[in-house]
Image (cartoon, rainbow, N blue to C red):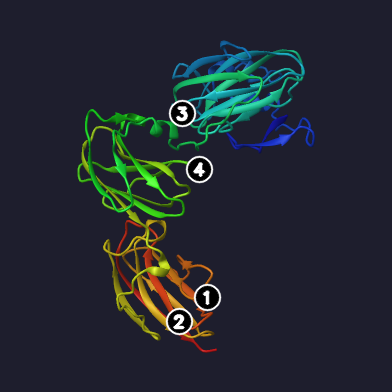
Amino acid sequence: MTYLWPAPPSNHATLTEVNIVSCPMRYLYLTSVAISAFLLGAPTFAEAQVSRSAFELLDVEGELAVGAEARGALSAADVRAPDDSYVEAWTLEGRAGESVTVDMISDDFDAYLYVVGPGFGETLYDDDGGGACHARITFTFLENGTFRVAASSTTPRETGRYTLRVSETPGPAADYPCGGMNPAVLSGLPTEGRTLTVGDVVSGSLTANAATITEGRKAEAWVLQGRAGQPVVVTLESSAFDAYLYIAGPGLGEVLSDDDGAGELNSRLAFTVPLDAEYMVVASQVSEGATGAYTIRVEEMARLAELPTQARTVVVGGTVGGLLSSADPITAEGRHGQAWALEGRAGERYTIELISEDFDAYLYFVGPGLMGPLEDDDSAGDLNSRIAVTLPQDGVYRVVASSLDPSLLGRFQLRVVREEP
């Protein structure tokens, strides 16, 4: 059995779980004075006595029962706390020694949940303990009596519907983060024979009859057959609407999503396929209303150590100029990468700088004897990159110019200096 022990809040706080055996009765303590102060700005509480919890003075929306659900809605008609969030209260009868889990579930706002009652010198509260934007509190009644469950929101004046569920044991929490896409929404979309493989370039169209996902946005789903370990880049392009791309499937942990990663309102996601399985690729839009044609491009991500140099060679002791463009291969994190050759001998030490006024420089260095790519963002200052390296072996190494933001491209300079031993 675990109790919920929040860290000290500013207004709202997040929770950690503490085992009751090792830390009995260590809820964060909020005295009745503090609770009254929390709700002091609401007219209903102007005459509240500090010896009583302000939550106990709220009008009751209804009664909760173990094993049952109740539905409510936060609205402008509700009492407001000083942080401007709306609050509604429910009662729950408890018997000493019984343990319960109270879940507050809402797809309309970020839920925030409180519990007060007999035997508790503290207020229990939670933000996202139920996964997604849902709140959850698991606790044991210390005395018989009537407890108050208060439903609220994390940010001011959020409104919408919610469900309160009281269970003897906690059920599974939502497996996606607050603000993220629910995988179940995407997995329920029809594919109607739309399939993808690496190397495909396909066309589709969002129409008024297309499926609708969150906030009324249109979406069309495709099935991508994935191979474990394969690095893949998926690009969604449209001149008709602001593209938004989702990818969901086993082993990803959560739904991948992107807005403008490919530049010019187009989307791009790069990932390594976790399993031999089918993955859902969903073409959607940033806002509802716009429809039209789109293109999905599926490519295998280029490996840094295999990028072609095309006779490009850095100048040791000098500077060379280049142009990073959309024609360059897509590499790690969906970034375009342009490779330049550096031939050196074991023990030689080089300092390499990537400088650009057009984009935030990101530099890679790969080659024989290195366990993996060396990489740097801003070590040269002013959004420029620098890598200092001692070569472990004789051979040809690749200096790869890239951009931190995959959507930004342009001109750059590579400066290479060999240091004396």
Q: In this rendering, is residue 277 above or below 261? A: above
Q: Are marks 1 and 2 in contact (CB under 8 Å)?
A: yes
Measure the C-alpha gap from mark 3 to mark 2.
57 Å
Q: Are marks 2 and 4 in contact (CB under 8 Å)?
A: no
Query: Which label was assigned to residue 253?
Result: 4
Q: Quadrant of the C terminus?
A: bottom right
Q: Which residue is mark 2?
A: 395
Q: Alpha-carbon neighbours of circle 2 within 10 Å: few (<14), some, or many (≥20)?
A: some
Residue nearest the observer in this picture, 54 or 319 = 319
Q: Earlier in the sequence, mark 2 or mark 4?
A: 4
Q: Earlier in the sequence, mark 4 or mark 3?
A: 3
Residue 2: quarter of image:
top right
Q: Which residue is mark 1?
A: 369
Q: In this rendering, is residue 158 above or below 421? A: above
Measure the C-alpha gap from mark 4 to mark 1.
33 Å
Element class at badge 3:
loop
Q: Which residue is mark 3?
A: 109
Q: Are marks 4 and 3 in contact (CB under 8 Å)?
A: no
Measure the C-alpha gap from mark 1 to mark 2.
9 Å
Amino acid identity at mark 3: Phe
